[in-house]
Image (cartoon, grey):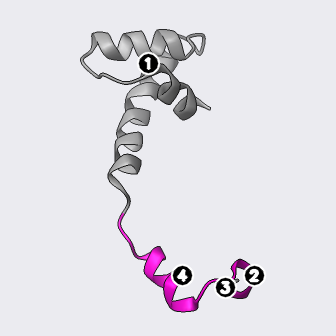
């Protein structure tokens, strides 16, 4: 696989063992908040309403980010 990706084997394994970035960790936390809100709405609410609900609950996040995570 390394030859297909044109990377060194040591670089691949170094990348594989790296911890997740802070942004990726935040995205996981947001997804855990988005899913219940979406299910609670009966699967009807889109990103604007979910974003508004998250903001009312104290989570400040942009609508585009919520839309990307909902995809």
Q: CA distance from mark 4 to mark 1?
A: 37 Å
Count of picture labels: 4
- Residue assigned mark 4: 12
- In primary-sequence order, the first of circles 1 and 2 is 2
- Residue assigned mark 1: 37
Q: CA distance from mark 2 to mark 3?
A: 5 Å
- Callout 3: 10 Å neighbours few (<14), some, many (20+)? few
- In primary-sequence order, the first of circles 1 and 3 is 3
Residue 16 part of the magenta segment: yes
Label 2–label 3 contact, CB within 8 A: yes
Q: CA distance from mark 2 to mark 4?
A: 12 Å
- Callout 4: 10 Å neighbours few (<14), some, many (20+)? few
Label 2–label 4 contact, CB within 8 A: no
Residue 57 locus on image (x, y percent): 27, 15
Q: Quadrant of residue 60?
A: top left
Q: Secondary structure at mark 3?
A: helix
Q: Secondary structure at mark 2?
A: helix
């Amino acid at each position: 696989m390394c030859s297909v990706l044109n990377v060194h084997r040591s670089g691949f394994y170094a990348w594989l063992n790296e911890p997740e970035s802070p942004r990726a960790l935040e995205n996981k936390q947001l997804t855990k908040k988005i899913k219940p809100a979406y299910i609670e709405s009966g699967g009807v609410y889109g990103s604007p309403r979910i974003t508004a609900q998250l903001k009312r609950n104290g989570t400040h996040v942009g609508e585009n980010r919520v839309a990307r995570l909902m995809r």
